[in-house]
Image (cartoon, rainbow, N blue to C red):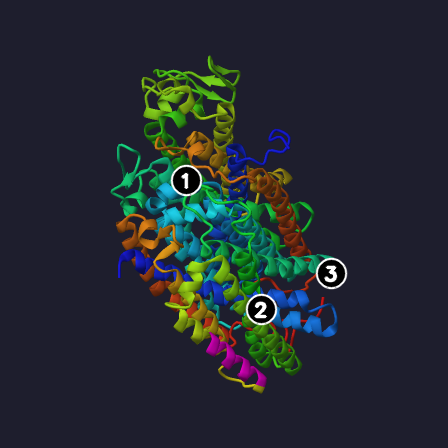
């Protein structure tokens, strides 16, 4: 394995973490958007609030990790993507600002109107951000990002069938993961009515994501043949794993099982991301720029790997400490606030 | 539609304006993020050591304020990492692998900071006093490390190192560690970190000075003024020395930036130091001139030769020299005034163990926070505008780094509106928090403790 491949794998770990944790966070916002203003909608929103409270900042960290790794290790790819896809990336950044500000302010806003506004910003941006991220992924996957400074088409590169479908798929898979997590959270929150509420939504989102995935494969066949071929050859085992996990999670959800649903749902998403990676390999920008071609200076790649090692040693224990305290309820208050 | 009427086309001016505006906004929150945890821990330490409930209450409230500013800092920081590629793709394409390392390190520090700030803010009630105090220490250390790393990237742009250029301009022989430990980081990073402590200290103190001017002179307000003020007052004279060293280093390492800051047109000795005044090609018009002092500041002798702008062609000189000169003088002037303010309290404290009794002292503290922010922005203008027309000093021009994508004018417009709203909302939220504390009403913050399971928070 070359250094460039190793760094690409590290980058893919970042993509996976962002898709799972960030996706679930975005998905939680999706459900608050649909929750409505009734009594049950309010309770659902409270649960979302309670569930993503302490760990939501991780979202930014995975994204920044991806951006920094990309520009340090694969500057050519970073520059090409960021310039051709200027419009959807600006819209995604806009969404990140609105979402973060909305989440931060809605808990402290003094007036009801301010709180409503903050909640609306949070919920709307939670849908738009992953959608535009998905269109970016679709543009890359369908080979619409040529090498160069804004060398691709500024509009059709991301407004095309593949991009739109992957955008929708990102929203749906985030909503699916979020609903699955929220079912467990509702049990911890001692809110039995919300268990059923989110179980129904998890099933609906699972079916939605499944339909979009199948539609995506059909569109890829006509619009991005290279990716289709990759997903049906090198990537096929992982696609099948994803299908099996997705179906397994759906069955468990139907039976109301307490254990295993979350693991299977996460596995379904992780498998499809690595299947995508396998299908695209050895390209970073399919059919125009390989990982080796995009790689920066060899010495920098080594340094990136060392820094990644340091990050694992420093950050993981700290993160484990945070989760430990959280699980033990040390970060919660008893009764009164 | 003609491009003049609707300027959608790629534009260097729009890209520079957007970068300047978003960075100028983020830098205030970054300063608070770096320095506020230390000030909170000072209050926390005093509270625990002396069993002082007022100090502990201040620390707890400040940590809730820090939660809000930390979030706004995180999102505006995320936008900046997008903008590196959205606005400057050619810069990142050529040099991403040279100076990317500091950002990777900053990422680690930021992650550590985010984790421990969550633990610290969540842990107020359930962790024991000192255990809780120690969970705050990594936040302070990570803030220092993160600030050092990010400034290392900026100082690399001023003093690029860790690579060689082939005859055709290709970057070779990359050494990311040499890039990290470039020639300017040794003075730029401490200068920025001290600025963070000064801005945050005076800003927090100014809030309590306003409260005292409105008649709330209880111990809560006095301590709320004294703790951050003391931290800032200690940092200010150190900053004066560090800044002086930085200016002398810039005169040596980036003489054209220095010449633009001081409006030195031709290389000569016995250079007059002008305080303010208008920069023209024939020298400074107006302003207060001190003969020979500029030479003396550069080399401790009025006989020191100072490099002038005429040593480089006009298209390699920074724009807006009067703005640069004024920004530099304003920064130094405000720092001097803040030092005097610190001395005022110091003398009063030595004599009477008390804050000066006159209202003029409180009025001065009340404006010191905004003054420190003005100084911060002025310093940033000197660094960034003074480096122009280079994005990498004497290696790459800013106009060669900019995106060819259309629509930067539109994104600039959106950013102006969005950040103005974000700034207003942040201030409104913080003011609402203060009002509710005065009404003794507790509430949730982004990182604040959750209600226990089964007991969702009461609707507002």
- Report crowding for label 3: few under 14, some 14 to 19, many 20 or more residues within 10 A (C-alpha): few
Q: Which residue extends farthest left?
A: B173
- Report crowding for label 2: few under 14, some 14 to 19, many 20 or more residues within 10 A (C-alpha): many
Q: Which residues are the magenta region?
A: A243-254
Label 1 and label 2: CA atoms lie apart by 37 Å
x 67%, y 81%: residue: A193
* Residue B236: % across, % down: 46, 40
Task: Give the camera-side residue of B320 and A175.
Answer: A175
**Left or right for A268, reference B185:** right
- Report crowding for label 1: few under 14, some 14 to 19, many 20 or more residues within 10 A (C-alpha): many
Q: Under tag 1, what secondary structure?
A: helix
Label 2 and label 3: CA atoms lie apart by 27 Å
Q: Is A17 drawn above or below residue A182 in the view shown?
A: above
Find residue A37 and report its image quarter.
Answer: bottom right
* Residue position for label 1: B90
* Residue A326: % across, % down: 50, 73
The answer as to whether the residues below labels 1 and 3 share one chain is no
* Residue B275: % across, % down: 49, 22
The answer as to whether the residues below labels 2 and 3 share one chain is yes
The chain to which mark 2 is attached is A
* Residue position for label 2: A175
* Residue position for label 3: A112
Q: Under tag 2, what secondary structure?
A: helix
Q: Main secondary structure of the magenta part?
A: helix
Q: Is residue B411 magenta?
A: no
The chain to which mark 3 is attached is A
**Left or right for A120, reference B335:** right
Q: Quadrant of the C terminus of chain A?
A: bottom right
Residue A319: in sight, yes or no?
A: yes
The chain to which mark 1 is attached is B
Q: Is B460 drawn above or below residue B332 in the view shown?
A: below
């Amino acid at each position: 394995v070359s250094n460039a491949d190793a760094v690409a794998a590290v980058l893919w770990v970042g993509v996976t973490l962002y898709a799972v944790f960030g996706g679930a966070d975005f998905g939680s916002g999706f459900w608050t958007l649909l929750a409505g203003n009734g009594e049950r909608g309010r309770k659902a929103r409270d649960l979302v609030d309670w569930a993503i409270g302490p760990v939501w900042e991780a979202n930014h960290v995975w994204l920044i990790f991806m951006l920094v790794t990309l520009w340090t290790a694969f500057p050519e790819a970073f520059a090409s993507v960021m310039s051709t896809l200027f419009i959807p990336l600006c819209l995604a950044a806009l969404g990140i600002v609105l979402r973060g500000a909305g989440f931060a302010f809605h808990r402290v806003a003094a007036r009801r109107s301010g709180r409503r506004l903050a909640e609306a910003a949070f919920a709307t941006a939670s849908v738009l951000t992953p959608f535009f991220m998905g269109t970016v992924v679709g543009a890359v996957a369908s080979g619409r990002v040529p090498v160069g400074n804004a060398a691709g088409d500024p509009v059709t590169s991301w407004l095309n069938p593949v991009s739109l479908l992957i955008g929708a798929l990102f929203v749906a898979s985030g909503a699916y993961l979020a609903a699955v997590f929220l079912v467990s959270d509702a049990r911890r929150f001692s809110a039995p009515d919300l268990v059923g509420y989110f179980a129904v939504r998890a099933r609906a989102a699972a079916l939605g994501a499944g339909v979009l995935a199948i539609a995506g494969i059909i569109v890829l066949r006509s619009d991005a043949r290279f990716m289709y071929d990759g997903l049906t050859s090198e990537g096929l085992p992982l696609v099948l794993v994803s299908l099996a996990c997705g179906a397994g999670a759906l069955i468990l959800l139907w039976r109301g099982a307490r254990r295993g649903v979350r693991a299977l749902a996460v596995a379904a998403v992780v498998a499809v991301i690595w299947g995508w990676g396998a299908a695209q390999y050895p390209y970073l920008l399919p059919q125009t720029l390989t990982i080796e071609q995009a790689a920066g200076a060899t010495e920098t790649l080594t340094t990136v790997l060392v820094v990644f090692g340091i990050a694992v040693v420093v950050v993981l224990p700290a993160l484990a400490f945070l989760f430990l305290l959280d699980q033990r309820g040390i970060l919660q208050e008893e009764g009164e606030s | 539609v003609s491009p003049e009427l609707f300027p959608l086309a790629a534009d260097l001016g729009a890209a520079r304006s957007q970068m300047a505006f978003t960075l100028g906004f983020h830098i205030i929150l970054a300063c608070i993020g770096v320095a506020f945890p230390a000030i909170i821990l000072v209050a926390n330490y005093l509270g625990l050591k002396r069993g002082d409930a007022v100090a502990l209450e201040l620390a707890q409230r400040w940590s809730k304020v820090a939660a809000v500013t930390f979030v706004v800092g995180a999102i505006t920081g995320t936008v900046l990492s997008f903008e590196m590629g959205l606005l400057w793709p050619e810069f990142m394409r050529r040099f991403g692998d040279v100076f990317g390392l500091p950002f990777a390190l900053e990422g680690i520090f930021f992650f550590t900071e985010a984790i421990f700030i969550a633990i610290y803010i969540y842990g107020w009630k359930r962790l024991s006093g000192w255990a809780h105090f120690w969970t705050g220490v990594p936040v302070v250390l990570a803030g220092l490390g993160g600030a050092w790393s990010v400034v290392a990237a900026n100082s690399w742009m001023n003093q690029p190192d860790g690579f060689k250029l082939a005859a055709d301009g290709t970057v070779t022989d990359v050494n990311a560690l040499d890039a990290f430990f470039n020639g300017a980081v040794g003075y730029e990073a401490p200068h920025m970190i001290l600025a963070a402590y000064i801005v945050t200290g005076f800003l927090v103190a100014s809030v309590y000075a306003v409260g005292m001017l409105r008649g709330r002179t209880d111990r809560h307000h006095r301590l709320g003024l004294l703790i951050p003020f003391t931290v800032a007052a200690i940092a200010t004279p150190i900053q004066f020395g560090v800044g002086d060293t930085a200016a002398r280093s810039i005169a040596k390492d980036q003489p054209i930036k220095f010449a633009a800051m001081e409006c030195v047109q031709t290389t000569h000795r016995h250079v007059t130091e002008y305080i303010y005044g208008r920069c023209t090609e024939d020298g400074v018009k107006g302003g207060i001139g001190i003969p020979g002092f500029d030479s003396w500041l550069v080399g401790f002798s009025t006989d020191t030769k100072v490099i002038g702008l005429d040593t480089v062609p006009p298209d390699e000189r920074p724009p807006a020299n009067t703005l640069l000169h004024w920004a530099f003088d304003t920064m130094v002037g405000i720092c001097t005034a803040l030092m005097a303010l610190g001395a005022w309290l110091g003398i009063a404290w030595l004599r009477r163990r008390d804050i000066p009794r006159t209202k003029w002292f409180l009025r001065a503290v009340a404006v010191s926070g905004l003054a420190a922010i003005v100084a911060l922005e002025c310093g940033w203008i000197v660094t960034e505008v003074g480096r122009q027309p280079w994005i990498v000093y004497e290696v790459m021009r800013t106009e060669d780094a900019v995106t060819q994508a259309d629509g930067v004018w539109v994104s600039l417009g959106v950013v102006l509106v969005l950040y103005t709203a974000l700034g207003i909302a942040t201030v409104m939220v913080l003011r609402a928090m203060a009002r509710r504390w005065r009404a003794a009403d507790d509430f949730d913050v982004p990182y604040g403790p959750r209600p226990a399971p089964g007991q969702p928070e009461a609707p507002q």
